[in-house]
Amino acid sequence: MESEILKGKLARLKDDPTPQSPAEDAEALSKREWCWADLGEGIGRILLDIPTIQPKNGIGEDVAKFRPSKHQESGNYDASYRALPHPRWPEPGAPTTDEIWCAYQAELGLRATANNSLREYCYWLTHEKPHLAALPPEKESDDLRKRADRALLQDAEQRAAENFAWLTGVWSARGIRVPSVEELEKLAASCVQVTNRETGEN
């Protein structure tokens, strides 16, 4: 069902009817450079419009000056974190090879994982870490609920350490200065202005 919904959205965006299977209207699909991609059991196969020519990149971000940040678009419940710059096409205007396409998609996937890891780490800093610090010393007489609460927060502490270690490795590998815990605490606690999804204006 989810696959059908996604394919329907793609078809409406392209103002073109969605074929029932990859075999139908193969010639028309090839002219548009569309291909079927299997996104796994939860979603299934969808049609992707792969550009034959590498598109222009947006405004470039200086990696040396990049800093993790967060923003919030109108209509979104919560802010989104940016742990890495948006990936860039290596040679805009040149043909898109399978290798370039796969590398670009891999960078998008890495960026999404990094963004989520940063979100989880910042949630730890602002919510779970203070709760763990506020717990009284552990006692043998603690009831099951207190023991469970402590165990959950200790698990969250371990995940936070793993997230930060992973992010540190990614940032270092890309020449991005690793922010301190204090800087990330300020980021997590900061408020952001809501940005209009269509215009990009506050």
Image (cartoon, grey):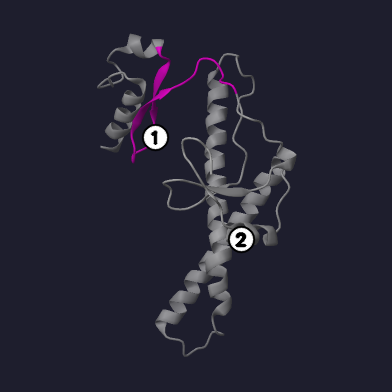
SS label for mark 2: helix
Specify the amino acid type for callout 1.
Leu
Q: Mark number for residue 18? A: none
Specify the amino acid type for callout 2.
Ala
Q: Residue 120, position in %: x, y?
A: 53, 56
Q: Compared to 21, does 126 lie above or below? A: below
Left/right of residue 176 with respect to residue 29 in the rendered view: right
**Could you give the CA–CA distance between mark 2 and mark 1, rounded to whole angstroms?**
30 Å
| Residue 14, image quadrant | top left
Q: Nearer the viewer, residue 196 or 98?
A: 196
Q: Is residue 53 magenta?
A: yes
- Residue at (46%, 79%) from the top-left corner? 147
Q: Residue 92, position in %: x, y?
A: 61, 19
The stretch in magenta equals 32-56
Quarter of the rendering occupied by the N terminus: top left
Left/right of residue 182 with respect to residue 97 in the rendered view: right
- Residue at (56%, 22%) from the top-left corner? 99
Q: Residue 19, position in %: x, y?
A: 27, 20
- Residue at (60%, 33%) from the top-left corner? 87
Q: Residue 121, position in %: x, y?
A: 57, 58
Q: Which residue is mark 1?
A: 39
Q: Earlier in the sequence, mark 2 or mark 1?
A: 1
Left/right of residue 44 with respect to residue 85 in the rendered view: left
Q: Is residue 15 magenta?
A: no
SS label for mark 1: loop
Q: Which residue is mark 2?
A: 161
Report the predominant secondary structure element of the magenta stretch: loop
Q: Nearer the viewer, residue 79 or 44?
A: 79
